[in-house]
Image: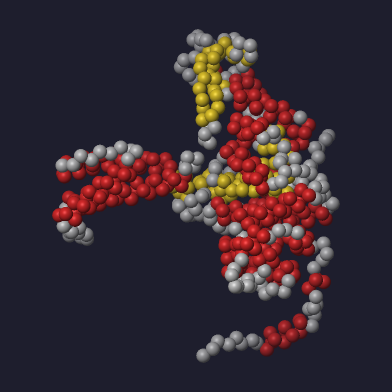
Amino acid sequence: MTNKTIIHPQYTQTAANYQLYLPMDVEEMIPLEDSVRLHCLLCERMDYRELLQAYSRKGRKPAVDPVILFKVITYAASQKIYSSREIEKACCRDINFRWLLQGYAAPDHSTISRFKQKYLTDTVMEKLFFQQIEWLYQQKAITGETIYIDGTKIEAYANRYSFVWKKAITKHEANMYLKWQALLEDINTTYCQIFTSTCETFLVDLKKVLAFLEKLREEEQITFVYGKGKRKNVLQRYHEQVKEMLQRKEQYNASNQIMGEKRNSYSKTDHDATFMRMKDDHMRNGQLKPAYNIQAAVDAEFIVGIDAFSDRNDTTTLIPMLQYLKEHLPFTYRHIVADSGYESEENYVYLKNEKQTAYIKPQNHERKKKAAFKKDIKQRENMGYDKSTDTYTCANNRQLHVLRSYTRASQTGYESQVTVYECEDCSGCPLKEKCTKAKGNRQLHVAKAFLAYRETAQENILTETGTLYRMNRSIQVEGTFGVLKEDYHLKKFHTRGTSNVRNELLILAFGYNLNKIHTKIQADRLNLYYHPLKTA
């Protein structure tokens, strides 16, 4: 028996009546200034060799042309449509999507999802996205000189309570090693063996002892028993304990390998996601959730680069982000504008070597303006410094001389030199309680190279150009994140893994730039790069 769809006569009559009013040419229904026409025009200028090479199949013709499918997905992103099922529905009902399909049948959601996962990968999408940026540069829609960088945390598509902490692993591993030493001593006593073990050879020794116990079991032909009412012999108990420790040790090693040296946590359902403190509501009740640190580079309100990182802070992401842009763009940005979260000696040195000007706001820039900071005698900035003698003078007119120097390594391994100054004598000083909590003399740790770079950056941001850049940074890049989160609903990712998240971001940025191009053309603002400073 075959299934047959029954159509009510009323539906047939209604469809026939409406057919009389439908225009035969879809082109007439789309206005000339519609963004879909601009999107199609820009996509026609792009090189799709990477996409076609990834999509090529032997002896099989694709259901929908891959270039057209790319147009559909990126245009859907500009219309805030991300789900494969929603894109399928739009292809069936929306006249703009029907026009983009150019006569092809609407693809189903499985075709769209398969295309995004297997063919439109992050490497392919990366090439196409930066072609869009090159076109903007050729049209002089972006400066190619000044870039604004900022970051935000977006929740990962992972379970909230699937966390693994490095401190917990280190603690459990240490406790397990103590139990292993006791167990190894019992095994040596029972079987008159001499097994030794260290933390460095812990895993190897576990395997060695387990192999010995299994060999002993085969030689004595001992059968292990399981279940209630079964009494386990000594060999089986030792075997099970060693095997359990081996499994736990291998699990701890795998977790440490996933986290590496930079991270202190990860999610079991998304290994690339790190647990970060999120600002969820207006009360800023921070919650630890698996998330990615999203870094965006904006020029003239356009996203010229976007990437996902597992680092919780922004300091370690600046250099990888700039190297990422340098690798994919045909030009180099000379003015780097960022907030105080990116300040570090390593970043300053990198920018100097690349001959890029740092417009990075120092971390103490706002605090130095407050009256309480200026009255705080323990702050280094409020002490007198004599460059000729390399000494500081405290509020009680006592000098701090150089005591020693040492090398301090950052999270990324960068080494900086730190000089330690110590007061000549703090005994009997009436201001000591306000100056230091140390029992002995007051010490001051100073990174001279870092302070020199900070002073240069401070001078840069206080110039008229630096003031303009700082104001535009808060408007352009922070405004971009606001639009992405609220208008484009970028509050939680729909995929897992850094590569899939990066691909999701690139598609979204492509659609965002399309809307920005269309808006600027309509407002005749395509070649306006900065928001002017407000004057009284």
- Could one spot residue 433 in this view of the protein? no
The residue under the point 51% across, 27% down is 408
In the depicted structure, whether residue 410 falls above or below residue 112 = above
Q: Position of residue 423 (x, y in %)?
A: 53, 13
The quadrant holding residue 295 is: top right
Q: Residue at x 83, y 64 (%)?
A: 32
**What residue appears at the point 64 percent right and 86 percent down from the top-left corner?**
7
Q: Position of residue 178 (x, y in %)?
A: 29, 39
Q: Nearer the viewer, residue 26 or 59?
A: 59
**Colour basis:** secondary structure
Identify the image quadrant of residue 115.
bottom right
- Please count the marks in the image: 0
Q: Nearer the viewer, residue 257 or 487?
A: 257
The residue under the point 76% across, 52% down is 135
Q: Is residue 284 above or below residue 127?
A: above
Quick check: can you spot residue 326? Answer: yes
In the picture as drawn, the residue positioned furthest to the bottom comes out as 1
Report the side of 148 relative to 122 (left or right). Answer: right
x, y percent for residue 153: 59, 46
Give 453 or 355, whichever is nearer the viewer. Answer: 355
Point out the image quarter for the C terminus. Answer: top right
Considering only vertical position in the picture, is 400 above or below 465? above
Measuring from the top left, give residue 184's x and y in whole percent.
23, 42
Left or right for 439, reference 494:
left
